[in-house]
Amino acid sequence: MPEQDETAKLWKVNRTIHELVKDRGFQVADEEISMDLNTFRQNFANNGGVVDRNQLNFYTNSRVNPTDQIFVFFSEEKNVGVKTMRKLLSILEEKAIQRGIIVFPTTMTSSARKVITAMAAQYRLEEFSESDLLVNIVHHTLVPRHDILSAEEKKILLEKYRLKETQLPRIQLADPVVKITRPSETSGRYASYRICF
């Protein structure tokens, strides 16, 4: 029974990571997102019901720029350390891919996180624990739509409202300027803007 629970968990994680990659502008087949649990078990679980996380790894191209690729790596190790990060980096180097996402079962050491920071100039790496991916919060009804503004859109926004960048509310350092659209009872939709600092 624990294997079935683990398989169901990984099915949800796999669906969410495919949605996340698709939302970022990469090619993902609808079948990958709409795959039901039984099909997932048939494709990825062995006879004992255990999922081989290595089979969940995938890479795909951007819909806009086919040379822009992303690789999603599912770690077999529960606690990701520098050794696992080296393995991911060697795969990225071998395939000449600049963007990577690592999905891990439980935790990531501070040393492994330092590798992400140290390699930021060469690779754009992101990390997610499996528990973070059980539900796609971006698709939740209570989370408003967030759109990244281009440099030109940002310039127009600042000129239109006669603002300086520092006057926009702040969000996380890794986030760009975004437009957040929320439903509103009085106006139908309400837009707000945030900038990273």
Image: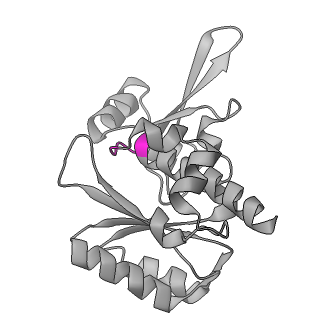
The quadrant where residue 41 appears = bottom right
Q: Name the foreground residue: 118 vs 72.
A: 72
Q: Name the foreground residue: 177 vs 72.
A: 72
Q: Residue furthest front?
A: 47
Q: Is residue 5 left or right of residue 104?
A: right
Q: Is residue 107 left or right of residue 103?
A: right
Please say whether residue 151 is visible from this viewpoint. Answer: yes
In the rendered structure, which segment of residues is drawn in magenta? 22-27
Q: Is residue 138 left or right of residue 92?
A: right
Image vertical order of residue 51 relative to residue 17, above or below: below
Q: Residue at x 19, y 46 (%)?
A: 65
* Secondary structure mainly formed by the magenta segment: loop
Location of residue 58 in the rendering, given as x and y in whole percent from the top left corner: 39, 61
Quadrant where the N terminus sits is bottom right
Here the colouring is one colour
The quadrant where residue 154 appears = top left
The quadrant where residue 184 appears = top right
Location of residue 75 in the rendering, given as x and y in whole percent from the top left corner: 53, 75
Q: Is residue 105 left or right of residue 171?
A: right
Q: Residue at x 43, y 49 (%)?
A: 21
Location of residue 57 in the rendering, given as x and y in whole percent from the top left corner: 43, 65
Q: Is residue 26 magenta?
A: yes
